[in-house]
Image (spheres, helix red, strand yellow):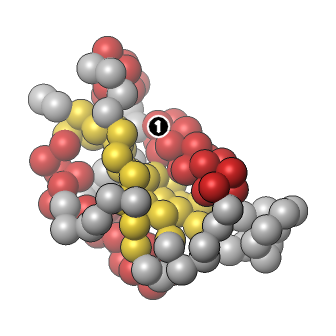
Amino acid sequence: MELKQVIVVRQDLDMPKGKLAAQVAHASVGAINRANKAKQKNWMQQGMKKVVLAVDSEAELKSLLKKANAAKLPTDLITDAGRTFLAPGTVTCLGIGPDDEKRIDKVTGKLATL
């Protein structure tokens, strides 16, 4: 089974590159920690495939969260602490997986890469 992780980022926030990278890292680590140990280990052995995708709004991101949770995929929704660029509590991105690539693609397969 091919495993991957997807990070979905809100494009409407127009985050600076450094801020975007930090938020993506938060989502990746958070979602990994919610995956079962066997999938974590297998994903790491497979090279940690990761894809970063884009959405246009918080509503779209939360809709994906509901779909991913319904599919019982490991997820982590990231909200910013508000110390730099964004207001406290701003939802920035969503980490999904690592899990079976086909299961994740059913949720995110129509999204464009960042």
Q: Residue at x 63, y 55 (%)?
A: 17
Residue at image coords 23%, 52%: 104
Q: Quadrant of the C terminus?
A: bottom left
Q: Is residue 77 visible?
A: yes
Residue 29 image offset from top left, x and y in percent: 55, 39
* Residue at the front extreme of this rendering: 17
Q: Is residue 38 visible?
A: no
> What residue appears at the point 54 percent right and 80 percent down from the top-left corner?
12
**Which residue is outermost to the right?**
83
The residue indicated by pointer 1 is 32
Residue 83 picture location, percent across and down:
87, 62
Q: Quadrant of the N terminus?
A: top left
State left or right for residue 84 relative to residue 37: right
Q: Position of residue 6 (x, y in %)?
A: 36, 49
Up/down of 9 relative to 103, above or below: below
Q: Kindly identify the amino acid type of the residue bearing the numbered disc 1.
A: Ile
Which quarter of the picture shows residue 109? Answer: bottom left
In the image, residue 99 above or below residue 111: above
Graded by Cα atoms within 10 Å as few (under 14), some (14 to 19) or many (20 or more), the crowding at tag 1 reads: many
SS class of the residue under badge 1? helix
